[in-house]
Image: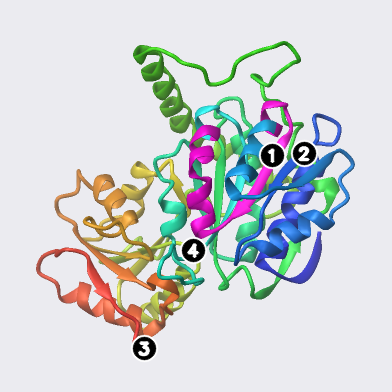
Amino acid sequence: MARDLVTGNHAAGYTLALAGEANRRARGAVCGAYPITPQTEIIEVLRAFEFTKGRVVPVESEHSAMAVCIGGALAGARAFTASSSNGLAYMTENVFNAGYYRLPIVLIGVNRTLGPPWNIWADQGDTLALRDAAWLQFYTESHQDLVDTILVAFRVAEDRRVLLPALVAEDGFIVSHTQMIVDLPEQELVDRYLPPCDIPHRLRGQGVAVGGMIYPHDTERHRIEIQEAMERVPTVLKEALDEFEQVFGRRPHGALSAEYTEDAELVLVACNTMVRTLRRVVQRRREQGQKIGLVKVKMFRPFPRREFEQAIGSARRVGVLDRNHSPGSGGIFWTEIATSLRRRPDVLLQDYLVGLGGGDVTPAVIDDIIEDLARREQEDEPLWKEVPA
């Protein structure tokens, strides 16, 4: 394991490259490549890598980048790409296609605000807009979490019990362009962890039609099979984490992680880099004797409903920090959590919209949220916590 000071984007590109190279004795690797701020460095790292059996294919748009991945995966290659914001929006048709084709492509989504008006800073609305596509979705907290999750995503997506694509999200600029010390995996270890990519329904030379017309009952059966695959993900994920720990000597966080919740009366929920700030605030308040806990949600699809209900313990007040917004509804994580807690009418659940468009979610912002949640008598519509100009 080599330790190095790298940006999140460099770490992501490096890890994708090694994952692709690990398939050199099988059908190789392919990446559809198109730049967009703040993910472009990922593609640059991949373009500089010399694959034994693989290609990075420059194309004219994000739509075509995913089309290349679809073609490569249908040929049996390990396929991957990266995008952000309006690039992801332009890619959407083929994102849905990849999921419905059951192709285990891995996509790095570098979270950036959708425009117009144009904003290049972190906001989860771009990847969460794809929440109804047949994709796994993982949200990462740090550079190391990003590296580890990419490898786990390949392992889970390519498992025959799943065979669905996976999106791994990192916060734009906060992770993508900052540098941290990271344990970068060596090729030998990646080779051990990732078996050859074997897509059972890959094209094998004979003339076939892919994605042709079907009848209503066939579509229903198709969607049921995707749902069943999603329901198998938790089991496959646990196995992938167990194997990761054996190969690399550390264990990444799973679908979610609960901290200080054993005796917590109040729990805050967050994902991505907001968790790092939240953790410091919770630790400080625990030292002051306050019974506060946190839950980090890493896997958004499939959403770990049962695990979440257990994770909050006996807490009666739960606040959700959403760096996203579904117009006319509220925070997207909040709506999922409300469904997860439908059997807990004793819980006061409040949504807080924070940091949209890249605003800094500071300890002071989190302190205000804690104070608001602690004195609440009843839940309210989602609350906007605007960051001071």
Q: Nearer the viewer, residue 131 or 88?
A: 88
Q: What's the magenta bit mostly, secondary-structure-wise?
A: helix
The numbered dot on residue 272 is 4
Which is in the foreground here, disc 4 or disc 2? 2
Q: Earlier in the sequence, mark 3 or mark 2?
A: 2
Q: Which residue is mark 1?
A: 79
Q: Residue furthest bottom?
A: 389
Alpha carbon separation for disc pair 3 and 1: 42 Å
Alpha carbon separation for disc pair 4 and 2: 28 Å
Q: Is 369 within the magenta?
A: no
Compared with residue 363, is residue 113 higher up or lower down, i.e. above or below? above
Point 34% across, 55% down: residue: 333
Can residue 237 be seen from the camera position used here? yes
Compared with residue 211, is residue 85 higher up or lower down, i.e. above or below? below
Where residue 378 sits, quadrant-wise, is: bottom left
Where residue 368 sits, quadrant-wise, is: bottom left
Can residue 251 be seen from the camera position used here? no
Alpha carbon separation for disc pair 4 and 3: 23 Å
Q: Residues within 10 Å of mark 1 (few under 14, many from 20)?
A: many
Q: Earlier in the sequence, mark 1 or mark 4?
A: 1
Q: What residue span does the magenta drawing correspond to? A: 72-98
Q: Secondary structure at mark 4?
A: loop
Q: Which residue is mark 3?
A: 389
Q: Earlier in the sequence, mark 3 or mark 1?
A: 1
**Amino acid under disc 4:** Asn
Screen quadrant of the C terminus: bottom left
Point 59% across, 69% down: residue: 175
**Amino acid under disc 2:** Ala
Q: Which residue is mark 2?
A: 29
Quick check: marks 1 and 2 in contact, CB under 8 Å? yes
